Amino acid sequence: METQRETILLNSFNETIQKWIDFLDDYTLEMLCQKPDDSSWSLGQVYTHITNDTEWFAEQMAAAMQTNADSEKEMHENAHMMLQNNRFPDITIQGPATGIYIKQPESKDEVRQKLLAIKNDVNNLYTSFDSSKAIGKTRHPGLLYFNTLDWLQFAEMHLRHHLRQKRRIDEKLFGK
């Protein structure tokens, strides 16, 4: 059962991160750095955010695979609902990262290479380690404890959640 879940989650993760990689072909660096208004992120800042967060999620996946610690601890009920629904709530989320400055990317190639490296690292992690034997959990700052497959699902959901933000930015800037 866990192997089937892992395969489904890994396939979903690969499909969603590949969309973000492929979208880069639709923009110049200048387009990526253009903000729809003063209080919004540019698409480049969204890319910076998703690469930073997904790198951290991948680190949590690896850490959870390599420990048995906190296996008895639970996730927050909001996290449980999100994972059960396989999506973030359809709302604009305000959190610590929304109030801080997120840097613009320096190049499209930098973004592409980071996304490809994350995709590669996550795939190597799951092909080189038997996640069914991993019972440890690591702590999410707001949603409490996730095991390795919860982190994988959360990472994909986070990438997918920001596709809505990408659509809003595209509509404001380009009428797409």
Image (tube, grey):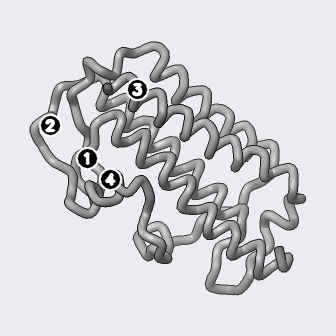
- Can residue 99 be seen from the camera position used here? no
Q: Residue at x 51, y 47 (%)?
A: 156
Q: Is the residue under label 2 in contact with that under label 4 (CB below 8 Å)?
A: no
Q: Is residue 22 above or below residue 97?
A: above
Callout 1: 10 Å neighbours few (<14), some, many (20+)? some
Query: For the residue marked with disc 2, what is the amino acid?
Result: Asp
Q: Is residue 132 above or below residue 70?
A: above
Q: Earlier in the sequence, mark 3 or mark 4?
A: 3
Q: Earlier in the sequence, mark 1 or mark 4?
A: 4
- Can residue 3 be seen from the camera position used here? yes
Callout 2: 10 Å neighbours few (<14), some, many (20+)? some
Question: Which residue position is annotated with label 2?
Answer: 70
Question: Which residue position is annotated with label 1?
Answer: 139
State how many labels appear. 4
Question: Which residue position is annotated with label 4?
Answer: 84
- SS type, badge 2: loop
Q: Residue at x 48, y 72 (%)?
A: 90
Label at residue 4? 3
Find the residue positioned furthest to the left. Answer: 72
